[in-house]
């Protein structure tokens, strides 16, 4: 690479960094030193909805790792700063700049952590995040998580690619959804989005 190309690449890199760092904070978020406060709500164990700002630490890249919220959440409501652990509240909700919504819930079956609720109903689908990396400007990166299904007050970790019969048991009382699950497995189209849709369909067409 000649010197001219090196200079051009350096200028492009500097320009990109300046553009990134000069972006204003997203609407609805309040910058407070090294933190962002997400304006959303939490639900008490009495099922009261309380408006709040949820406190999330940022790293040097203005990114946040939501797995930090699995064991404790810090928030501010009209009574001031509060810290909750799983079981202290029913749930809390945050939204990212790209419009994604994250609902974390306390479960009776496991009060050691908050679970991300994907689908809730007669059958519920939850994620237990290991790594969640996103940033305040709406960019995202791959998530790493375990998949849990809850039915009849039982919380079960599942692997969609190797536990066909275990998952099948959740749908055995709904012949239509069961047949769809079998078809997904045969054609090799088992993915989380379709699995979530399948659970929604089960909840809507329970026999």
Image (cartoon, helix red, strand yellow):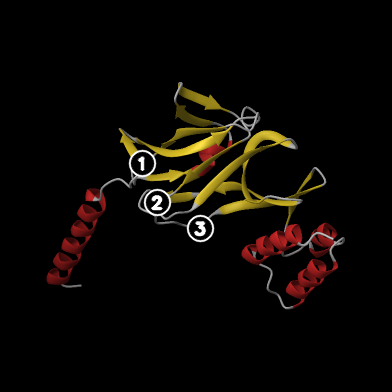
Classify mark 1: helix, strand or loop. strand
Q: Quadrant of the N terminus?
A: bottom left
Image coordinates for residue 191, horizontal then vertical, percent: 65, 66
Q: Which mark is residue 105?
A: none
- Relative to the observer, which residue lies in front, 174 or 19? 174
Which residue is painted at 46% across and 57% down in the image? 141
- Mark 3 nearby-residue class (10 Å; few <14, some 14–19, many ≥20): few
Residue found at the far top of this picture:
79
In this picture, is 187 found above or below 67? below
Residue found at the far right of this picture:
173
User: N-terminal of the two: label 2 or label 3?
Assistant: 2
Classify mark 2: helix, strand or loop. loop
Which residue is painted at 62% across and 48% down in the image? 117
In this picture, is 74 found above or below 162? above
Give the Cα distance between marks 2 and 3.
Answer: 17 Å
- Relative to the observer, which residue lies in front, 201 or 7? 201
User: N-terminal of the two: label 3 or label 1?
Assistant: 1
Classify mark 3: helix, strand or loop. loop
Image coordinates for residue 131, horizontal then vertical, percent: 53, 48
- Mark 1 nearby-residue class (10 Å; few <14, some 14–19, many ≥20): some
Image coordinates for residue 169, horizontal then vertical, percent: 85, 59
Q: Give residue 111's quadrant in the image.
A: top right
- Check disc 2 and report the residue beneath it: 97
Image coordinates for residue 116, horizontal then vertical, percent: 60, 46
- Check disc 3 and report the residue beneath it: 142
- Check disc 1 and report the residue beneath it: 29
């Amino acid at each position: 690479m000649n010197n001219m190309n090196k200079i051009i690449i350096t200028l492009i890199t500097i320009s990109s960094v300046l553009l990134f760092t000069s972006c204003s904070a997203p609407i609805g978020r309040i910058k407070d030193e090294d933190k962002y406060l997400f304006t959303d709500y939490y639900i008490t164990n009495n099922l009261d909805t309380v408006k709040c700002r949820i406190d999330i630490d940022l790293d040097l890249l203005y990114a946040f790792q939501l797995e930090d919220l699995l064991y404790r959440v810090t928030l501010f409501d009209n009574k001031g700063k509060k810290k909750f652990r799983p079981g202290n509240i029913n749930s809390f909700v945050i939204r990212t700049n790209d419009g994604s919504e994250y609902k974390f819930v306390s479960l009776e079956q496991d009060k050691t952590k908050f679970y991300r609720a994907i689908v809730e109903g007669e059958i519920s689908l939850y994620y237990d995040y290991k790594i969640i990396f996103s940033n305040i400007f709406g960019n995202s990166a791959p998530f790493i998580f375990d998949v849990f299904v809850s039915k009849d007050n039982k919380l079960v970790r599942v692997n969609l690619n190797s536990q066909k019969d275990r998952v099948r048991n959740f749908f055995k009382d709904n012949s239509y959804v069961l047949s769809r699950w079998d078809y997904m497995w045969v054609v090799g189209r088992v993915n989380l989005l379709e699995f979530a849709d399948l659970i929604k369909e089960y909840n809507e067409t329970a026999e």
